[in-house]
Amino acid sequence: MDILVIGGGGREHAVIKALKKSRRAGKIYALPGNGGIARDAECVPVKATDIAGITEFARTHRVDFAVVTPDDPLVLGCVDALEAAGVPCFGPTADAAIIEGSKVFSKNLMKKYGIPTAASETFTDPAAALAYLKGANYPTVIKADGLALGKGAVIVNSFEEAEKTVNEMMVERVFGASGDRILVEEFLTGPEVSVLSFTDGKTVVPMVSSMDHKRAKDNDEGLNTGGMGTVAPNPYYTEEIAGTCMETIFLPTIRAMNAEGRTFRGCLYFGLMLTKDGPKVIEYNCRFGDPETQVVLPLLRSDLLEIMLAVRGGCLREDMVRFRKGAACCVVLASEGYPKKYDTGFAVSLPETGPDEDIYIAGAKLENGKLVTSGGRVLGAVATADSLKEAVGRAYALADKIHFENAYMRRDIGKRALAALEDR
């Protein structure tokens, strides 16, 4: 089967490498891909949001199956357009992708169907939001309604910070139309857990849990980023908690979407907070998380393409999805200055990878046949092992062999998870 993968980051690189292992995989195209992905797929310079261009390419190249991974094209209806053109897809249609595309929609869904989440209020008027925030308990969370590159949720510790955030989102419109509506949400505390899941709209099969590290600096300091590293599995996510989540969150969410006429088929991401009152939903994503995918898929023993075909065909079974025992760690190498201003165009030197090691390229391009940096998060160094401690050590050993000018990485990825394991 010839396969088309939409997107061009580290997540897509991980997906493509997993798809290449399938016995049924033929030629793989990446639109637009990147300089690292070009080693594993044919990259075509069509933007992930160019729905017409993507559809035309898939049709003229007689693509057998498409995998739409980023949030923007999913929310814009890329799956709808491809399916209408006769191209089977992995990924939700636009009416289901709204679960990520609108935080107000997902919050209302949870309230309506009794899915545990933080208390919140919705505002379309900045003055009304500020009047409410004058009497709020701090810290509190302010979220832009729409997509905002993972930066649309801000924890504020005072009314002054809240006022600044509301003005940025609603008046200055730093996120464009995504900030026309905002949520003011209760601040939850507890360990955070990311759980990706395959679902065909009936069956839900969770993948290995993971722990993301969002802050730019060690000890969870600095600005929020798209993710500076991940480990899997998440030690806080026990079998007991997993059972609770299945009964109170995962299955109820799928049933709620069905009841709303928005059947979800694809990868549904659950961002969870394990509070003293039990697990609660922080956010939904309508696709594979980044960089969670970079530690989850290396642990997958099953054929990813067969799983995706079953999801699309509505015949997913739990026994189709198997993961190896052990753990994985991803250390992100970023450009110094990310997530704010940073320089690019530096040559990237990559080592040979050993068994159970991989390098997923996110922000690099080819110039005269050489890989050079082109983004904030440049790549992820990944290792799997029998224990988390070994996986972390191997991931950092690999990361230290990678070189480019202006490179930066956190040095404490997995530290919290290892401490949690020691406390058991």
Image (cartoon, grey):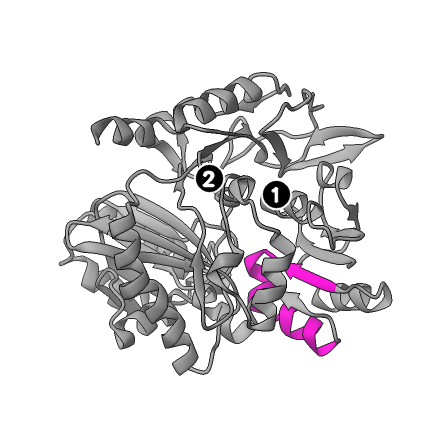
Q: Pinpoint residue 123: horizontal percent, then vertical percent.
A: 30, 69
Q: Is residue 107 above or below residue 36?
A: below
Which range of residues does the magenta coloring cover? 65-85
**Crowd around label 2: few <14 · some 14–19 · many ≥20 (10 Å):** some
Percent of width and height locating residue 304: 61, 53
Magenta-span inclusion, residue 51: no
Q: Residues within 10 Å of mark 1 (few under 14, many from 20)?
A: many
Q: Residue at x 56, y 22 (%)?
A: 399
Which residue shows up at 55% across the image and 73% down it?
314
SS at circle 1: helix
Question: Which amino acid type is shown beneath numbered disc 2?
Answer: Gly
Question: Does 280 appear above or below 123?
Answer: above
Q: Amino acid at mark 1?
A: Ala
- Residue identifier under label 2: 227
Q: Which residue is mark 1?
A: 14
Question: Going by the image, does 173 lie left or right of 276?
Answer: right
Does 297 sit left or right of 133 as displayed? right
Label 2 element class: loop
